[in-house]
Image (cartoon, grey):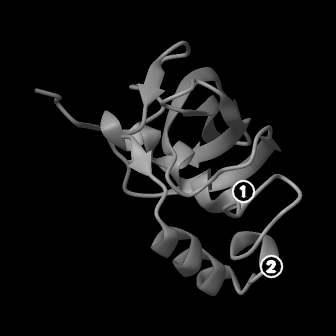
Amino acid sequence: MVKFKRISYDVVRVGEEFMSDDFLIKPEDVETFAFAVDDHHPWYFEDSPFGGTIAHPVLLGNQALLMRHSRYIVPAGLHARMQFEFVEPVRVGMRVRSYGKVIDKFEKRGRHYMVTEFTTKNEESGAVLTRGQFTQMLFPD
């Protein structure tokens, strides 16, 4: 059983690894996301140059952020920097998972930050879909 601690600068370790839950991309996920961000590009609902429909590349952005929730209670934080590289198209029917690692933590102007790099993969083929890193300010207890 996983014991959940509240995330904090003192608890997080550089080198610590995370893994998200798996996520099956469903047609309604693509529709809901398109509505939420008001982006109804035809590639998401018709054909694309990638051979068939694709999902919005940022659809999986939150999955990478949620990796920490597999180990910690994360009540709040401030995203100081996010960087994504979209490697392969995300498609309906893919089962995906994000893998990450804390690569740095630091203090700046009296505030604490952690840097996590991540890769999101197609679970069936192992193909990398998205990779990047995010820097989050950790609020004190």
Residue 79 in picture, x, y percent from top left:
65, 54
- Near mark 2 (Cα within 10 A), the count class, few <14, some 14-19 or many ≥20, is few
53 vs 130: above or below: below
- Judge by depth and name the residue closer to the eye, 114 or 70: 70
The outermost residue toward the left is 1
Relative side of 113 to 74, left or right: right
- Residue at numbered disc 2: 41
Q: Is disc 2 in contact with disc 1, using a CB cutoff of under 8 Å?
A: no
Residue 41 in picture, x, y percent from top left:
80, 79
- Near mark 1 (Cα within 10 A), the count class, few <14, some 14-19 or many ≥20, is some
Residue at 58% across / 32% down in the picture? 121
- Judge by depth and name the residue closer to the eye, 118 or 24: 24
71 vs 92: above or below: above
Report the mark closest to the observer, 2 or 1: 2
Residue 61 in picture, x, y percent from top left:
62, 53
Circle 1: residue type = Pro
Residue at 54% across / 55% down in the picture? 62
In this rendering, does residue 110 appear at all? no
- Judge by depth and name the residue closer to the eye, 141 or 51: 51
Q: Quadrant of the N terminus?
A: top left
Circle 2: residue type = His
Instruction: Classify residue 30 by image quadrant.
Output: bottom right
103 vs 78: above or below: above
- Residue at numbered disc 1: 57
Q: Report helix, strand or loop for mark 1.
A: helix
- Judge by depth and name the residue closer to the eye, 60 or 134: 60
Q: Report helix, strand or loop for mark 2.
A: loop
